Image (cartoon, rainbow, N blue to C red):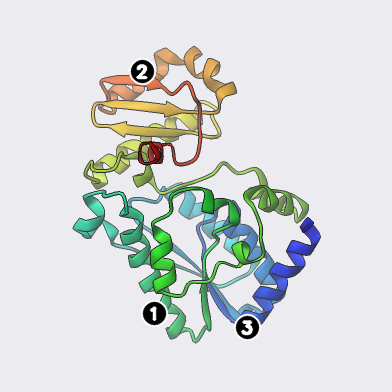
Amino acid sequence: MNLDKKLSRLKKIISNMDSVLISFSGGVDSTLLLKVTSRVLPQDKILAVTAYSATYPKEELLFAKDVARTFGVRHKIIRTYELEDKKFTANPINRCYFCKKELFSRLKDMAKKFKLDFVADASNISDKEDFRPGNKAKKEFKIRSPLQEAGLTKEDIRLLSKKLGLVTWNKPAQACLASRIPYGKRISPQILARINKAEEFLRQLGFLQVRLRHYNGLCRIEVFKGDIPKLISHHDLIVEKLKRLGYNYITVDLEGYRTGSLNEVLKR
């Protein structure tokens, strides 16, 4: 199916929903979903909701607010409390289930309050290639995934976003900060803040796609393979900064950035 047909299918899916609450992070996927929805449904039939906690970088929250304002849609920000759930902070392999359960239960309540028929997230077809325990919560709460239903891949979404003039078309992939911590290692607000500060510093050096995987006193930095020489050239600055943040050993992953690298141990 070509891109235009997939877009037409997406519009039809959204139109048939009549009214919807969209889980909106401000990332590539949810921005496209919100944009298309804003063209298909009346404004009073749409509500974008961004969940904020220590697992979500503050700069992403500000970006989501700006995007929603640009689209002219109603936008609410809620706090989620997954860090108060010991099942989440223990960081088991199904950690994402507990996070999504907290989020989707809140969104379903909001949809009921605002008399909206559906809650939708921005999952796409490419997400099925990775380990996603949060999908169990999605099924339990009957969350719709219009992008996935329309057969859109991550690449499709970037191409459509560019075609529609969205600033997010080439935005680096984002993920919950807890995804930087190996399974079984306890999650805390302090560790999440340290990871966020480290990644923020690396982005300031000009690295668009960055992941800092946290192993207590050691960290493993992932950037695109082509950016590894640049990373090495800044080694003095990086070592100094990350040691001040509490890392004794700073390493570079020679495989480069890839989605869900901490899930590779599960596959093995």
Find residue 27 and report its horizontal and vertical position in percent.
Answer: 55, 52
- Callout 2 secondary element: helix
Compare residues 5 and 162 and report the one nearer the observer: 5
Tell me the residue at 49%/53% (across/down): 62
Residue 104 lies, with reference to residue 152, above or below; the image says below
Find residue 86 and report its horizontal and vertical position in percent.
Answer: 19, 57
Tell me the residue at 59%/22% (across/down): 226
- Callout 3 secondary element: loop
Identified by mark 2, the residue type is Val
Q: CA distance from mark 1 to mark 2?
A: 46 Å
The part of the image, by quadrant, that contains residue 248 is top left
Compare residues 242 and 97 and report the one nearer the observer: 97
Identified by mark 1, the residue type is Asp
> Extreme bottom residue here?
115
> Extreme left residue here?
86
Q: CA distance from mark 3 to mark 2?
A: 53 Å
Residue 77 lies, with reference to residue 179, above or below; the image says below
Judge from the rendering whether residue 111 lies leftward or rightward of residue 172; answer left or right: left
Identified by mark 3, the residue type is Asp
> Extreme front residue here?
268
N-terminal of the two: label 1 or label 2? Answer: 1
- Callout 1 secondary element: helix
Q: Which residue position holds label 3?
A: 18
Tell me the residue at 66%/57% (across/down): 152
Judge from the rendering whether residue 7 lies leftward or rightward of residue 135; answer left or right: right
Q: Report if the CB atoms under discs 1 and 3 are less than 8 Å apart.
A: no
The part of the image, by quadrant, that contains residue 132 is bottom left
Q: Which mark is residue 239?
A: 2
Q: Which residue position holds label 1?
A: 109
**In front of the other: label 3 or label 2?**
3
Judge from the rendering whether residue 48 lies leftward or rightward of residue 1; answer left or right: left
